[in-house]
Amino acid sequence: MDHRKVNLTVTEFVFLGLSSDPKIQLVLFSVFLFFYILSVVGNAIIITIIQIEPRLHTPMYFFLTNLSFLDICYTSTNVPQMLSNMVGSKKTIPFARCATQMYFSLSFGMIECVLLGVMAYDRYVAICHPLHYTVLMDQNTCVQLAAISWSSSFLSSMVINVLTLSLPYCGPNVLNHFFCEVPSVLRLACTDTSLTELVVFVFSIIIVFIPFLLIIVSYARILLSVLRMRSASGRHKALSTCASHLTVVTLFYGTAIFMYMRPQSKSSRAGGKVIAVFYTVVTPMLNPLIYSLRNQDVKGSLRRAITKQNL
């Protein structure tokens, strides 16, 4: 079947996926199913531990709860569709469901960008202004910052998706991807997409790059503050509270900037799919491992919870 045949109106999209080899697809299905289960269970454990442990009811862990819940939503938006395509004979998705997946996938990705910036600011206040921390990062402020992260991203994603979906799609209908993502869908529009790509780039600057600058500035100030500390134990404690967040930032922002902060004409489509696997499957799975293995408070709370269950 020639999927490049021009249709009057595209009503569904066909996924090429990651591989056309059935044996490779079976291996990928097993690996990604394991990653998905690990991601959902791991993030759910982080949320549960934070909720049941009173000493973790602090701004830093409030934002970590948001991040863990977000990772569950993000990976659940894309991975089940990918797994279905790997084992099912029908690798299609209706236009309306593709639009919905594209909207929520982009929204959750944007939220994570903003939320990581907020978490960096929280660490800055805690380390550089410890005496004013409880005042500057009170409960209302934390809730407001989280609400701004979610609402601004949902609204921004709506603008991008409306512009993307308002373009004519008359064929072809083959997505060289494993889920509906704005860059891959834009390539199938049968009209000039330069204006929409410019809008996507502008929103990428606002939602991706500005929080990234906030992270850089926050950690630059943190580093200067740590270097002025006389106590070696104080320096170690300050840096250890930032290590997990910095690791997550590096993983997520490295892939996000690669995908959205450069002209699409210069990107490798095969490489783009590999990067997409990383931030939709691997990163949400690694986040709870990073925060549990590198964070003494979380490890201690997890041990206490396990001990209580065994008693």
Image (cartoon, rainbow, N blue to C red):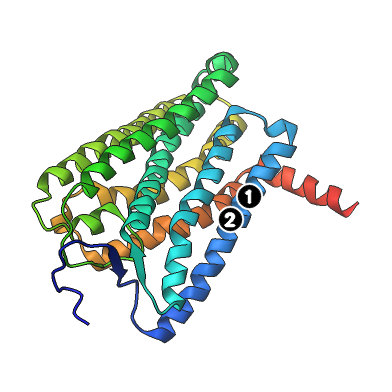
Foreground of the two, 136 or 111: 111
Residue 287 position, x and y percent, is 53, 50
Q: Residue at x 37, y 51 (%)?
A: 100
Residue type pointed to by label 2: Val
Foreground of the two, 133 or 166: 166
Q: Is residue 25 above or below residue 263?
A: below
Query: What secondary structure is marked by label 1?
Result: helix
Q: Which residue is mark 2?
A: 40
Foreground of the two, 54 or 123: 54
Q: How many marks?
A: 2
- Mark 1 surroundings: few (<14), some (14-19) or many (≥20) residues within 10 A: some
Cα–Cα gap, marks 1 and 2: 6 Å
* Residue 124 makes an appearance in the image: no
Q: Which residue is mark 1?
A: 44
Whether the residues at callouts 1 and 2 have beta carbons within 8 Å, the answer is yes
**Does residue 237 appear left or right of residue 181 in this picture?**
right
Figure quadrant of the N terminus: bottom left
Q: Residue at x 16, y 67 (%)?
A: 7
Q: Quadrant of residue 301?
A: top right
Residue 4 position, x and y percent, is 16, 73
**Does residue 235 appear left or right of residue 212 in this picture?**
right
Q: Residue at x 59, y 21 (%)?
A: 139
Query: What secondary structure is marked by label 2?
Result: helix
Q: Residue at x 56, y 57 (%)?
A: 39
Residue 205 position, x and y percent, is 25, 37
Residue 57 position, x and y percent, is 67, 30
**Does residue 282 appear left or right of residue 183 in this picture?**
right
Residue type pointed to by label 1: Ala
